[in-house]
Image: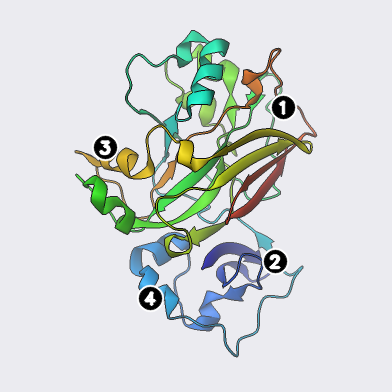
Amino acid sequence: MYLYTVMEARGETLAAAWTQDGPLYRLSDLGVSYGSMLELIEHMTLAELRTLSPAGKTPLEPGTYGLLAPIPRPRQDVLCLGINYADHAAESAKFSDTFRKAEPVPVYFSKRVVEAAHPDEAIPSYPGLVEKLDYEVELAVILGKTIKDCPVADVPAAIFGYTILNDMSARDLQTRHTQWYRGKSLDKFTPMGPCIVTADEIPWPVRLDIRCYVNGELRQHSNTAQLITGIAEALSMFSQGTTLLAGSILATGTPSGVGMGFDPPRFLHPGDEVLCEIEKIGQLRNTIG
C-alpha cells in the first residue's frame, strides 16, 4: 500500500493508493478515523491495512489536493546514518578531514525537523548564512513499533514502511561546528515523500536503486544493497539502551555524487531543481528558493 498525507480545501487528510501510480482514496472514506500518519502508525498494523479496499469508493480528484510530507511533523528528530556508502565515504574525506571515520562503526547524527518539506516545495537557500548548500538522496525507514534493545533478527517485523528523504546540508555550517546537527537542521532541510510504501510491498533485504538528479543531470546512482551498515543492524545497535518510538524515521545514508564530492564542488543555487528517486517508491522533487 502507498500511504499519503495530502492537503485538501477541507484540510490535512490521509489517503492511500493500491498501486504506485494509482488513484488516491481518503482513508476516512474507508473507515479509518486517524487524523495523522503518526496516529495511524501507532494504532494500525500492516495486516489491518491490508483488509482495506477501495471498492465502491470515489477517489480523490486530481488537482483538488496537494501532497505533504507523509509525516509532516516527526515526533522525534530524524535519526540519520552518516558515511554509510563506501564511495561517499571516500569523496567526503577528500572534501574535509572532519568526515574521516576513526573506527569502523556507524556514524549516527540527527536532524531537527519542525516541519518536513513536502514534494514540490521550495527549499530556502539562506543567502548570507549558507554558501555551500548540498543534496543527499536517502532511503528513509519508518518504524511501526516502539523498540528498545531490539535484536537484529526482530527489526524487519518492526518496520512499517519506507519513503524518500533528501538530507539537505549546509556544508559550511556542518564543517564549522564540531557536530553536524547545525548544518543539517535548518528549516525545510528535510524534504520527504512522496509517500510511505508499506514494508510488505518491498522484499527483505531491501535492495532498491537510488538516484538523484540536479537540473536533469544524474548526480547520484547506487543501490541500497551497498549500505555499509544495514537497516536492521543500524536500528538494532541504536536501540540498545535507547527507546525508538513507533513512527521514528531512520535516514540510511547517501551514495557518492553529492555536490561537495566534485572537483571543484558543485553546490546548489536558487532556481536549481533536485529530483530524488528510489525504485518502488517514486520521486521527490524540490527547487531551491
Which residue lies under the disc numbered 1? 268
Residue 116: image location, x then y, percent = 55, 46
Disc 3 to disc 2, how far (Cα)?
40 Å
- Tell me the SS state at disc 4: helix
Residue at left offset 75%, top offset 27%: 269
Residue 220: image location, x then y, percent = 64, 33
Disc 1 to disc 4, how far (Cα)?
43 Å
Which residue lies under the disc numbered 2? 65
Identify which amino acid the numbered label 2 is placed on.
Answer: Tyr
Identify which amino acid the numbered label 1 is placed on.
Answer: Leu
Identify which amino acid the numbered label 3 is placed on.
Answer: Met
Residue at left offset 31%, top offset 51%: 245
Q: Residue furthest bottom?
A: 56
Disc 4 to disc 2, how far (Cα)?
26 Å
- Tell me the SS state at disc 1: loop
Disc 3 to disc 4, how far (Cα)?
29 Å
- Tell me the SS state at disc 2: loop
- Image position of 32 (left or right of 17): left
Of the image marks 2 and 1, the number of the one nearer the N terminus: 2
Disc 3 to disc 1, how far (Cα)?
34 Å
Numbered disc in front, either 2 or 1:
1
Which residue lies under the disc numbered 3? 237
Disc 2 to disc 1, how far (Cα)?
29 Å
Q: Residue furthest top?
A: 97
Of the image marks 4 and 2, the number of the one nearer the N terminus: 4
Vertical side of 149 occupied by 184: above or below: above
